[in-house]
Amino acid sequence: MTSPPLVVGVTGSRRDGSYTRRTVEHALAAAERAGADTDHVDLGTADLPLYDPDRDAEDAGDAVDLLARVRAADGVIVGSPVYHDSYSSTFRNFHDYCGWDEYEDTVVGLVVVAGGGTFSSTLDHLRITMRGVHADVVPQQAGIRNASDKFDGDDLLDEDLADRVDDVAEAVVAAAHRRAAVDDAVGARADD
């Protein structure tokens, strides 16, 4: 890969002061330190009507732009708050717009944030549905319990959790580099 990989963070929260947004921003900063360019799709600020398969994406607010940004990514870090032991409707709505075109051959890392004490089902649900659109989900993942106790402003206070979020971002960047190297090698052989 001659240029840095592009890692796009997708925040699936609408809450003002969202801990999920802060976590995704932390992950994107780690991806930048690992050598990636980054972009942040904050679904809390997007104009994205409820998905309707009979509506053209051009008539669905920001859908075309958001899909193009994810499609351009070499890696994506998906973040969602935990709602009823799964991911948020905000992320689900965006995910319904997405398909293979957005995620096939794209590396994905997962982070979830719980106001209480559980997040494992949310990570499982995200992993399953991301694989359903052919994403290459890295094994590293991060979950944050009792989020209000873990942040001071935008800073993630728990060093172990911060390291886990960093690990997710670094894994996404490293896997994007490996995937690009394989693609370059295959392209070089095809040119021979």
Image: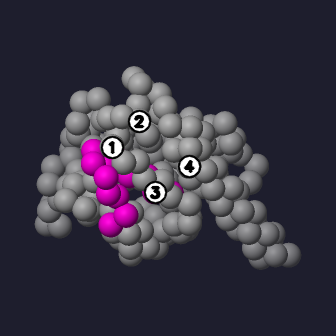
Say few, some or many: other residues with alpha carbon within 10 Å of mark 4 (under 14 / 14 to 19 / 20 or more): some
Give the distance between the C-alpha atoms of the residues marked 4 and 3, in whole angstroms.
Answer: 11 Å
Q: Secondary structure at mark 3?
A: strand
Range shown magenta: 109-121
Give the distance between the C-alpha atoms of the residues marked 1 and 3, in whole angstroms.
Answer: 18 Å
Lower sequence index among marks 4 and 3: 3
Discs 2/4, front: 2
- Where does residue 13 sit, x and y in percent of width and height? 27, 43
Left or right, 60 with reference to 161: left
Left or right, 104 with reference to 173: left
- Where does residue 100 sit, x and y in percent of width and height? 42, 70
Q: Secondary structure at mark 2?
A: loop
Q: Amino acid at mark 3?
A: Leu
Discs 4/1, front: 1
Give the distance between the C-alpha atoms of the residues marked 1 and 2, in whole angstroms.
Answer: 7 Å
Which residue is the site of mark 2? 150
Left or right, 41 with reference to 85: right
Residue at figure coordinates x 35%, y 40% from the top left: 147
Quick check: 138 above or below 94? below
Asked whether residue 64 appears in the rendered view, the answer is no
Q: Quadrant of the N terminus?
A: bottom right
Say few, some or many: other residues with alpha carbon within 10 Å of mark 3 (under 14 / 14 to 19 / 20 or more): many
Lower sequence index among marks 2 and 3: 3
- Where does residue 81 sit, x and y in percent of width and height? 30, 49
Residue at figure coordinates x 47%, y 28% from the top left: 155
Lower sequence index among marks 4 and 1: 1
Residue reaching furthest to the top: 153
Whether the residues at callouts 1 and 2 have beta carbons within 8 Å, the answer is: yes
Discs 2/3, front: 2
Q: Secondary structure at mark 1?
A: loop
Which residue is the site of mark 3? 110
Q: Which mark is residue 164?
A: 4
